[in-house]
Image (cartoon, rainbow, N blue to C red):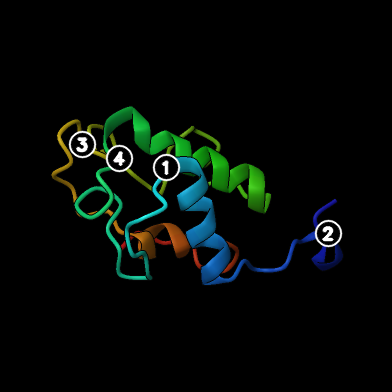
Amino acid sequence: MNDRHDLRPEPSLEEVIQCVRDSSGDRKTAIDEHTRLEKDLGITGDDGSEPIEEAELRFGVSLFDEEGNAFGLKENEYLFTAEGLASAGLSTGYAAFPGRLSPT
């Protein structure tokens, strides 16, 4: 059942930042809605799955569609690069929660 009463409240930016801190282990870097996961926090490659999985568990959302694609990425498109060259930002992840799922 998926009616309004079953939905969790939308997380605050502070909750999303704490989720990123917990999953990345980064306690020192200043993080705000403009922070880029790869460029600013160094989250790349497979390490990028950790904040996504943590967000899904913590906030009760799924960031993947029925086919297993996140953020509407197409074949050979990736959210994170192996060397940290993409521009996925915290605002991308923050936009992923109820009513806000959309890539930047």
Dot 1, how many residues are within 10 Å of its Cα: few (below 14), some (14-19), or many (20+)?
A: some
How many marks are shown on the rendered structure? 4
Under circle 3, the secondary element is loop
Query: Label 3, label 4: how many angstroms apart (C-alpha)?
Result: 15 Å
Residue 32 lies, in percent from the top left, at 37, 70
Q: Nearer the viewer, residue 52 or 17?
A: 17
Q: Is residue 104 left or right of residue 100?
A: left
Front position among marks 4 and 1: 1
Residue 39 lies, in percent from the top left, at 19, 52
Q: Which of 51 and 77 is in front in this view?
A: 51
State the residue position of label 4: 74
Q: Considering only order in the chain, which callout, 1 or 4, is on the residue closer to the N terminus?
A: 1
Under circle 2, the secondary element is helix
Check contact, mark 4 vs mark 1: CB within 8 A: no
Query: Label 4, label 1: how many angstroms apart (C-alpha)?
Result: 26 Å
State the residue position of label 1: 24
State the residue position of label 3: 81
Most extreme residue toward the front is 28
Query: Label 1, label 3: how many angstroms apart (C-alpha)?
Result: 16 Å
- Res. 6 mark: 2
Q: Is residue 73 above or below residue 67?
A: below
Front position among marks 3 and 4: 3
Residue 46 lies, in percent from the top left, at 34, 28
Dot 4, how many residues are within 10 Å of its Cα: few (below 14), some (14-19), or many (20+)?
A: few
Query: Label 3, label 2: how many angstroms apart (C-alpha)?
Result: 35 Å
